[in-house]
Image (tube, rainbow, N blue to C red):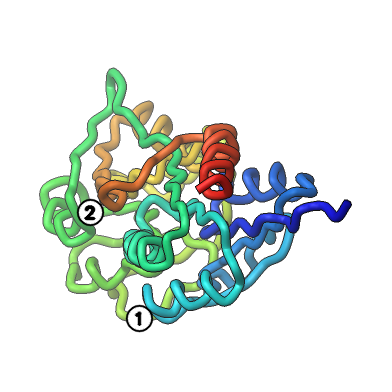
């Protein structure tokens, strides 16, 4: 008797959680796993299984890809701030009736001694800076530097994986680096560059969390850009293990329906 064909799972995102999920699912003979990376990083860490790199061409293009490649389940494990691709995925999945799950790591939570200033956007973060400090450690990613390009008084230390492209602040030094980072290293960096304010996104990643502890220990205020909400009416889990459990249930229901 012939075995049933493998079910096709598409994972969106190059996050740590996406790679862990791909590695766990790749060993299942009942599944065929494809990971989709946006291609914004020059040398991404490739996950297990098949990989495609590049955009889809909006929700219509993604829906077409899902249909043409016979995708049975879609898991959005993109960065918590990749709201455009997340909403495109929701529209595409709904259009072709493919089960969709959002995998999002938990956000950071302020503790005793933290001097956090929440901001709803990068633009709001930029408006807060003049009252908080003059030497800014900016860790919001190279794609969002335009929001700070008009600020001529502060000096910015920018850390990103790849070199940023203009527009960006006129007084800027760039460090090309990739986490995980250590508390000792972050504390030394803040001291050496005489940083007096940190700006970061609430990515929730443990690999980049030491900068928050280092800022607290140094008494430095932190502007935390709040993450956008996940698409409405889409289930959300926090761990790859929860995503695996959802997937088995979703594919079972899909098969029987």
Task: Name the side, left or right, on which 14 lies relative to 6.
Answer: left
Which label was assigned to residue 134? 2
Mark 2 crowdedness (10 Å alpha carbons): few <14, some 14-19, many ≥20: some
Of labels 2 and 1, earlier in sequence is: 2
Instruction: Count residues near mark 1 (Cα–Cα under 10 Å), then give few for <14, some for 14-19, many for 20+.
Output: few
**Residue 144 x/y as whole percent:** 32, 66
Q: Which mark is nearer the camera, 2 or 1? A: 1
> Is 41 left, or right, of 213 in this rendering?
right
Q: In this view, does 149 lie above or below 253?
A: below
Task: Give percent across and percent down for residue 91.
Answer: 33, 65
Which quadrant of the figure has residue 212?
top left
Left or right side of 52 for 130: left
Task: Label 1: state its secondary structure.
Answer: loop
Q: Do the residues labelled 2 and 1 touch (CB within 8 Å)?
A: no
Q: Which residue lies furthest to the top in this view?
A: 112
> Looking at the picture, does residue 142 appear above or below residue 227?
below
Number of numbered markers = 2
Q: Is residue 138 left or right of residue 53?
A: left
> In front here: 214 or 246?
246
Q: Nearer the viewer, residue 207 or 256?
A: 256
Front-lying residue, 46 or 4 = 4
Q: Which of 160 and 88 is in front in this view?
A: 88
- Checking the image for residue 234, the label placed there is none
Q: Distance between the residues labelled 2 and 1?
A: 21 Å
Q: Quadrant of residue 169?
A: bottom left
Report the disc number at residue 166.
1
Indicate the position of residue 106 as horizontal and vertical percent values.
40, 35
Residue at (23, 61) in percent of width and height? 154
Please give the name of the residue rendered at 23% of the width and 66% of the height, measured from the top-left corner. 148
Question: Residue 234 at x, y = what percent?
Answer: 34, 47
């Amino acid at each position: 008797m012939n075995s049933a064909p493998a079910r096709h799972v598409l994972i969106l995102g190059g996050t740590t959680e996406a790679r862990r999920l791909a590695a766990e699912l790749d060993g299942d003979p009942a599944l065929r796993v494809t990971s989709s990376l946006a291609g914004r990083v020059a040398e991404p860490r490739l996950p297990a299984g098949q990989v495609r790199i590049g955009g889809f061409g909006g929700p219509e293009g993604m829906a077409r890809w899902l249909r043409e490649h016979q995708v049975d389940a879609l898991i959005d494990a993109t960065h918590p701030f990749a709201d455009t691709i997340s909403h495109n995925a929701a529209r595409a999945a709904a259009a072709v009736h493919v089960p969709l799950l959002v995998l999002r790591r938990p956000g950071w939570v302020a503790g005793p001694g933290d001097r956090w200033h929440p901001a709803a956007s990068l633009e709001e973060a930029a408006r807060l800076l003049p009252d908080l400090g003059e030497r800014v450690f900016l860790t919001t990613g190279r794609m969002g530097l335009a929001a700070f390009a008009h600020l001529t008084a502060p000096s910015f230390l920018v850390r990103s994986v790849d070199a940023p492209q203009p527009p960006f602040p006129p007084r800027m030094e760039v460090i090309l680096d990739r986490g995980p980072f250590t508390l000792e290293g972050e504390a030394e960096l803040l001291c050496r560059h005489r940083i007096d304010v940190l700006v970061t996104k609430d990515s929730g990643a443990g690999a980049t969390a030491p900068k928050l502890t280092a800022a607290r220990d140094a008494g430095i205020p932190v502007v935390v850009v709040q993450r956008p909400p996940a698409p409405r009416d889409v289930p959300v889990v926090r761990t790859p293990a929860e995503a695996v459990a959802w997937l088995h249930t979703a594919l079972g229901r899909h098969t029987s329906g």
